[in-house]
Image (spheres, helix red, strand yellow):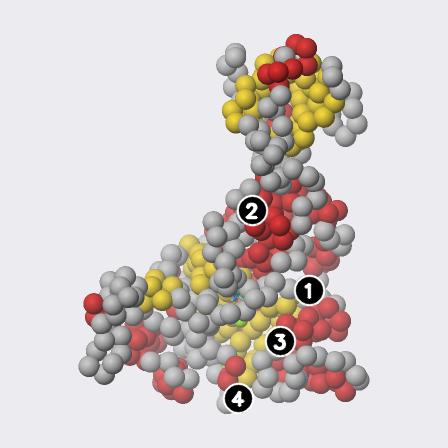
Amino acid sequence: METITRTKIVDVLKSESFGTKVNVKGWVRTRRGSKQVNFIALNDGSTINNVQIVVDIEKLGEEYLKPITTGACISVNGILVESQGQGQTCEIQAEEIEIYGTADPATYPLQKKGHSLEFLREIAHLRPRTNTFGAVFRIRHHMAMAIHRFFHERGFSYFHTPIITGSDCEGAGQMFQVTTLDLNDVKKTEEGAVDFAGDFFGKQTSLTVSGQLEGELAAMALGAIYTFGPTFRAENSNTPRHLAEFWMIEPEVAFYEIEENMQLAEDFIKYCIQWALDNCMEDIQFLNNMFDKELIERLQFVLKQNFVRLTYTEGIKILEEAVANGRKFEFPVYWGADLASEHERYLVEEHFKCPVILTDYPKEIKSFYMKQNEDGKTVRAMDVLFPKIGEIIGGSQREEDLEKLSRRAQEMGVPTKDIWWYLDTRRFGTAPHSGFGLGFERLLLFVTGMANIRDVIPFPRTPNNAEF
Ligand code: 4AD
Ligand code: MG
């Protein structure tokens, strides 16, 4: 076969160099036609759109073409021509085809159109080859780019915090233990506890639930940082919004008070959504048509809104009024209760019909490091609540006073000896500062309109599921 430099299908489809010879490579989505002429829809992942390959059966040989079925990988040399058919501007008249890999129709799982998302989760190794997951994972890439650009443009440094940690000070969730101990022969101390002295790190270690505490150390030097990495929570919450392994973005900024923190969060989410609309429209349009007819409208709507800001106490009042007026919730509403997703979504979707930032939560239901308010009851927490998602961001102004912070840690059972290094930031040159964490997959749920968080990460980790 003649060697021609490969052109990506995304570029071929934009090209108007009709009459020239091109090479494309990709995977066959469909093949149809008559005994004389066949049409192959070819996709190479560079765009959701396929290029149509027109094949003269007699010219290329019926026997030779036989293995070119759905899922096969081929390389095509041909002439780019203006398309006669509807729905495309150009197509390629094949002159030579090389078959890289076949996909036996008897065993290739992606035959019929319209597999369920549940079925596709069972073949997560192949689902990127579908239109839906191609779109989702291209958008995922674009969102990661948008996030780095947003912070880079604002002078934030990307700071890498450890994945393996020796302390569970965050209290954000159950942790996964990391060990090289032989679990069939665990040595015990005299007191009968597991002897971690013989473990890899000489102490008990886990996968991190958040990079925040280390992020705060960096903010006290670099001024403004963000983390962007995987985090791990072993809670047994089998919901469409929880993963055991998810990615989190955590900015932390010296000298920010909660108001600036809220503004950063709002600007940040809007920047990401605008980026998606500007750069991923074909994919979003596809998902809009397939799964969620209001997706584009919802994205555009959120961009236009100023997020409503109110305190937890005001939020509880609104929920209590709703209950008094007959609105039923599964979980009880009272001052001091942790808000369930149904409460958050009531505020966002039914009451305000707009994203909401709730602040000043009861200290009992928030982490020890949040700045304590004068009232002695609440802390300067801020949760950003989104339509269809509920909590998308959690954050706060941080307690910068060493004594108050240590006291709160003790009250909440956080072993201060394990976080001597964290407390040192308050000992040496402490400063007011704030930060938050955005769940990357929650953002993706919003931007793609997908309903289940397992469908916006390539290989989801959830209870009883770590295949692939
Ligand atoms: O509210 P969270 O637990 O906050 C923290 O971890 C803080 N250290 C953040 C900070 O202030 N730097 O988690 C932050 C966000 C949530 O709002 C949610 O979007 C996401 O992380 N999240 C999850 N996403 C998927 N699966 C889970 N199990 C999640 N738990 C939290
Ligand atoms: Mg939270």
Q: Report the residue marked by disc 1.
A: 387
Q: Residue 340 bears which disc, if any?
A: 3
- Amino acid type indicated by mark 2: Ile
Q: CA distance from mark 4 to mark 1?
A: 29 Å
Single out the mark in the foreground, 2 or 1. Answer: 2
For label 1, the crowd category at 10 Å Cα-Cα, with few meaning under 14, some 14 to 19 and many 20 or more, is many
Q: Secondary structure at mark 3?
A: loop
Q: Secondary structure at mark 4?
A: loop
- Amino acid type indicated by mark 1: Pro
Q: Residue furthest top?
A: 59
Q: Residue furthest front?
A: 106
Q: Is mark 3 within 8 Å of ligand 2?
A: no
- 162 in relation to 369, above or below: above
Q: CA distance from mark 4 to mark 2?
A: 49 Å
From the viewer's perspective, tell me whether residue 185 is left or right of residue 67. left
Instruction: Choose the circle earlier in sequence order: 4 or 3.
Output: 3
- 358 in relation to 294, above or below: below
- Amino acid type indicated by mark 4: Lys
Does residue 178 appear in this view?
A: yes
Q: CA distance from mark 2 to mark 1?
A: 30 Å
Locate residue 379, reporting x and y percent: 51, 81
Q: Report the residue marked by disc 4.
A: 377
Q: Report the residue marked by disc 2.
A: 123
Instruction: Choose the circle earlier in sequence order: 4 or 1.
Output: 4
